[in-house]
Image (cartoon, rainbow, N blue to C red):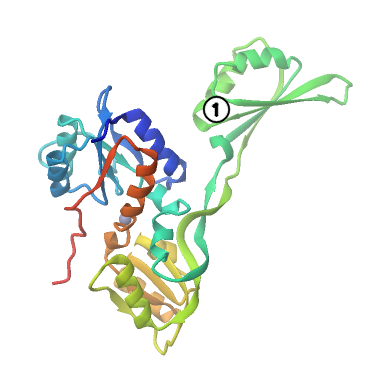
């Protein structure tokens, strides 16, 4: 029996496992429903999607936190009503004090995340992201260069803001010793920096605002590409995918005249935008449209489609194992009712 942990500490560990800074800008990740504190988490339920059966199961199993890979709240919410099935789920979570957390594209981009798990269907060497994730060091997006005669005064003016300062003295052409104070901040604190400097009595000469460039992070990013250690026929690739994803059926679009697959590109979920134009002998993803499949096949790639969430769900076993090591006082379950809505009949 688990002794439980406070929600804040649990969320901290979930974020250490997959930082929310890895999420795509359009995504809605993190703690989406936060019950009022104190909220002790004894049981976490991992699921790919929060559906009515998964919520029923969570209520039966007295779950305190649902970790749903896809975010159950995505677009801006103006009202929560009983008329919509997704709203009803969120209302029930709130009424029953169930917290909801979604990692989504943090798991996609993470090194060792869902895409690394997916490409594990094959015996590969040199797995790399199709597109590298980009991060701004330290989470700062802007640098404000301030030329001042009194850097000590400036430091006290900025001391209450969440910024990082780097100062270096310079001698101007007139022989005067000045200090360039570079203030690193994010977009939210940028206006506060300007306001604080303008409202202060410190003598500022010039202010320059520089937007910091994002730097690609090795090993993190969208999709994965790899070469195979041994070339496979399309049928052998299909068998490897079925085994890894525990599926009886997948769909194959075979490239004309193709014999062997030497390289693969994968993208969990809906892969067209990530895989388009990638030079690989095989694309493995959950779903692609008819026209995207035609484009891929006649541009030189075999395509295996498994339905969207079948390329994501299996990773939850790995998440359970990894989080269990860090959350020893919490019972972590994988939903038994979560499944892809499409079945081959
Ligand atoms: Zn998905």
Task: Provide the secondary structure element on which disc 1 rests.
Answer: helix
Evaluate whether residue 203 shows in this view: no
Q: Position of residue 112 (x, y in %)?
A: 45, 54
**Who's the residue at 21% across and 50% down the image?**
335
x and y, in percent, of residue 84 in the image: 13, 43
- Single out the residue that lies furthest toward the bottom: 257
Look at the image and tell me in which quarter the C terminus lies. bottom left
Crowd rating for badge 1 (residues with CA inside 10 Å; few <14, some 14–19, many 20+)? many
Q: Residue at x 31, y 71 (%)?
A: 243
- State the residue at coordinates (44%, 78%): 299
Considering only vertical position in the picture, is 115 above or below 161?
Answer: below
Q: For residue 164, which quarter of the picture?
A: top right
How many numbered discs, if any? 1
Q: Quadrant of ligand 1?
A: bottom left
Compared with 156, 263 (above or below) is below
Seen at 32% across and 62% down, the residue is 311
The furthest residue to the front: 1
Outermost residue toward the left?
A: 83
Residue 293 is situated, as x and y percent measured from the top left of the image, at 35, 74
Comparing 226 with 276, the one in front is: 226
Q: Mark 1: is the Cβ under 8 angstroms from ligand 1?
A: no
Residue 104 place in picture, x, y as percent = 35, 48
187 sits to left or right of 23: right
Indicate left or right for 179 with 85 as reference: right
Mark 1 sits on what residue? 190
Q: Let me know if residue 58 appears in the view.
A: yes
Q: Quadrant of residue 206?
A: top right
- From what the image shows, is residue 242 above or below residue 132? below
């Amino acid at each position: 029996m688990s002794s439980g942990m406070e929600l804040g500490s649990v969320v901290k560990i979930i974020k250490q496992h997959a930082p929310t800074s890895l999420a795509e800008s359009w995504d809605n990740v993190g703690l989406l429903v936060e019950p009022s504190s104190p909220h002790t988490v004894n049981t976490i339920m991992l699921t790919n999607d929060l559906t009515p059966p998964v919520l029923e199961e969570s209520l039966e199993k007295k779950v305190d936190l649902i970790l749903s890979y896809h975010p159950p709240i995505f677009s801006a919410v103006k009202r929560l009503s009983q008329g919509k099935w997704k709203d009803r789920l969120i209302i029930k979570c709130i009424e029953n004090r169930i917290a909801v957390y979604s990692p989504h594209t943090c798991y996609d981009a993470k090194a060792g995340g869902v895409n690394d798990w997916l490409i594990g269907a094959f015996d590969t060497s040199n797995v790399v992201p199709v597109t590298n994730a980009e991060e701004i060091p330290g989470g700062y997006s802007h640098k404000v260069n301030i030329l001042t005669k009194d850097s000590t005064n400036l430091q006290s003016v900025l001391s209450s803001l969440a910024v990082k300062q780097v100062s270096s003295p310079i001698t101007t052409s007139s022989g005067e010793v000045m200090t360039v104070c570079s203030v690193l901040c994010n977009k939210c604190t940028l206006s506060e920096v300007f306001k604080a400097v303008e409202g202060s009595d410190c003598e500022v000469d010039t202010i320059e605002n520089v937007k910091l460039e994002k730097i690609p992070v090795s090993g993190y990013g969208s999709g994965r590409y790899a070469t195979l250690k041994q070339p496979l026929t399309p049928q052998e690739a299909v068998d490897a995918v079925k085994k890894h994803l525990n599926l009886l059926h997948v769909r194959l679009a075979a490239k004309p005249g193709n014999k062997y697959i030497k390289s693969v590109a994968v993208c969990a979920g809906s892969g067209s935008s990530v895989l388009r134009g990638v030079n690989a002998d095989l694309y493995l993803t959950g779903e692609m449209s008819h026209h995207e499949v035609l484009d891929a096949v006649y541009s030189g790639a075999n395509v295996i489609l498994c339905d969207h969430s079948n390329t994501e769900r299996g990773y939850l076993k790995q998440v359970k194992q990894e989080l269990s090591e860090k959350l020893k006082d919490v019972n972590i379950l994988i939903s038994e009712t979560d499944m892809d809505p499409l079945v081959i009949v």
